[in-house]
Amino acid sequence: MKVLFLYPNLRGMNMLPPAIAILSALLKRHGVESELFDTTYWRIPGEDNFDSDKAKEKNLNVRPFDFAEKVTLHETDVFEDFEKKVQSFSPDLIAVSATEDMFLLAIRLLERVRSRGIPTLLGGVFATFAPELALSYPHIDMVCVGEGEKCLVELCDRMGRGRSYDDVTNLWVKKPDGSIVKNLITDPVDLSETMIPDIGIFEESRLYRPMAGQVYRMLPVETHRGCPFTCAFCNSPSQERFYEQETGKKFLRVKPMPKVREELLYYRDVIKAEYFYFWADTFLAWSQKQFDEFCEMYADIRMPFWIQTRPETLTEYRVRRLKAVGLHRVACGIEHGNEKFRRERVDRRMKNDDLVKWLRILNDVGVPYSVNNIVGFPTETYELAWDTIRLNRQVNADNHNCYSFSPFHGTPLRTLAEQMGYITPEVITRSLTRDSILDMPQFPRTQVEGFRRCFVMYVKFPEERWPEIKQAEAFTPEGDAIWERLRDEFAATFFASKPEEESGANAIRA
Ligand code: B12
């Protein structure tokens, strides 16, 4: 049995996808051959050679960086190369892992090999929350709803033995008449049974990633799955609700520390990692005991690391202890500056004063951090968005990122956007670093985008510059010229000195 994973990614979104490494390791243990076609370092025709890291750099979200020494880009045609890969490997199954923004590229690639009749399976967060929409594309034969570990192993076992796989748990199968067989969802995976992910399935270049203007050999590490918070734009709370409803079990799990250690040591000693990236939604969603256990365990790993966490989980004790063992950078969400709007629409309940106080702990202890914000939420107005600028001005982060709201399927804010008539159910969302997909009467797309491109300037430049910055919001030749000039000034002022301390890349916006 041979499985070809497809990762239909755009250049610049260059952190390794943990799911493929996890699933490939499992397949190999079960005697299934697996290979990967990962489009990250190809130019994708029709995608404007879109590079989201470079877009972040252009929007002053990250320090300029140079990747060239570490990474080899493919100059050949991605569609032809995919076809060649399918021909030479001759898989029995094409297994796609995709977030929503990647899905349409998967379809374009699969179109090239569709005539070969190889069964296709889509997994990931989009498959989980929009399975019917995914299966409405003729290129997709099956979807995995929820976690893939048991589903993929069982499916491959059945396919390998020529058996029927219509009743494999978590699997939805499209029948020749177009009907869909929907199977039950199994319990969440026991994280004490996980294997070391198959990092070898990725090309060497994919291990490198920019951070704070430097390029590191960076590996993603799992500490938790799930999130205890309920932000209305995020899919993680939806996973909690979905698993609770389908299995009666909690989706949020903490990985046993010896397992985390085993993974870290393997990456450090065998893969020669230089930097760790803990991708948990809320890294500090630990009890005090678990937290202390982590710090003790990590003390002899001696490697810098990045985390993301909620502001309210920051305490001076925790930040100091983490810094002592290697914490290098933190990313936190502010998301919106108006308390009422943030509570009612975004479902993030905290006071602005507290938020400022929690983030200040990072300044006091001396840990650089970035803050993430969103503009263009359903029902938001330009005036409300200004509260986000005002709040960010009270926070001394070294990166203030602002992204347009993305209505991902399965989130409460997607449902609201559909109810408000801003978007129809079949529309598929693109990457956060792209223009807003919503065009709302009270806050039109161009206004959202003008606001977004000037956001960090409003936050960092003195208030008397605001009238000048306001002109740069306009997408006119004059507006563009002012924006370019301000952008250069911004880069010279804020990205010129002490690169390590003063700024950094937001490794992900998730
Ligand atoms: C790590 C991470 C990243 C990494 C890796 C992304 C990836 N493709 O895996 C990077 C940094 C690249 C990234 C980027 C982005 N991310 Co991100 N990211 C995450 C994060 C924090 C963890 C994902 C993860 O690895 N989980 C662990 C693995 C084991 O779980 P999993 O990926 O869900 O996979 C399981 C199942 O889904 C399934 N499965 C997955 N693939 C497959 C394939 C097959 C064949 C099968 C059978 C099963 C299967 O089995 C897996 C094991 O159980 C999640 C939040 C979260 N907690 O899930 C957000 C999340 C996935 N990201 C999100 C977003 C929005 C983005 C960006 C669009 C942001 C941007 N900058 O524009 C980009 C999109 C990028 C891209 N091209 O991938 C959203 C996705 C929303 C959506 N519905 O699409 C999430 C859910 C967070 C959120 N806001 O809700 N992200």
Image (tube, grey):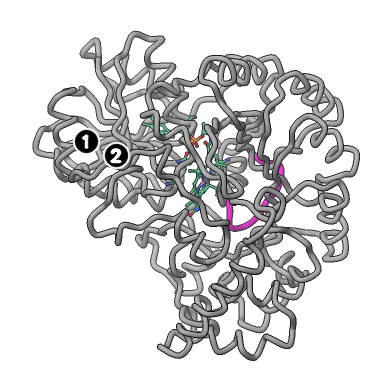
The answer to which image quadrant residue 228 occupies is top right
Q: Secondary structure at mark 1?
A: loop
User: Residue at left 31%, top 57%?
Assistant: 49
Task: Please say if the residues under marks 1 and 2 sit with CB atoms less than 8 Å apart.
Answer: yes
Q: Which quadrant is the N terminus positioned in?
A: top left
The x, y position of residue 189, in whole percent, is 56, 23
**Residue at image mark 1:** 175
Q: Is residue 230 magenta?
A: yes
User: Residue at left 53%, top 73%?
Assistant: 453
**Residue at image mark 2:** 180
In the current view of this chain or complex, which residue is farthest to the front? Answer: 497
Disc 1 marks a residue whose amino acid type is Lys
Q: Is residue 351 left or right of residue 383?
A: right
Compared to residue 374, the image places residue 450 above or below, namely below
Q: Is residue 93 magenta?
A: no
The x, y position of residue 324, in whole percent, is 82, 32
Q: CA distance from mark 1 to mark 2?
A: 6 Å
Q: First in sequence: mark 1 or mark 2?
A: 1
Q: Is residue 404 left or right of residue 490?
A: left
Q: In the depicted view, which residue is nearer to us: 465 or 400?
A: 465
Compared to residue 91, the image places residue 77 above or below, namely below
Q: Is residue 61 visible?
A: yes
Checking the image for residue 59, the label placed there is none
Report the span colored magenta.
226-235
Compared to residue 182, the image places residue 166 above or below, namely above
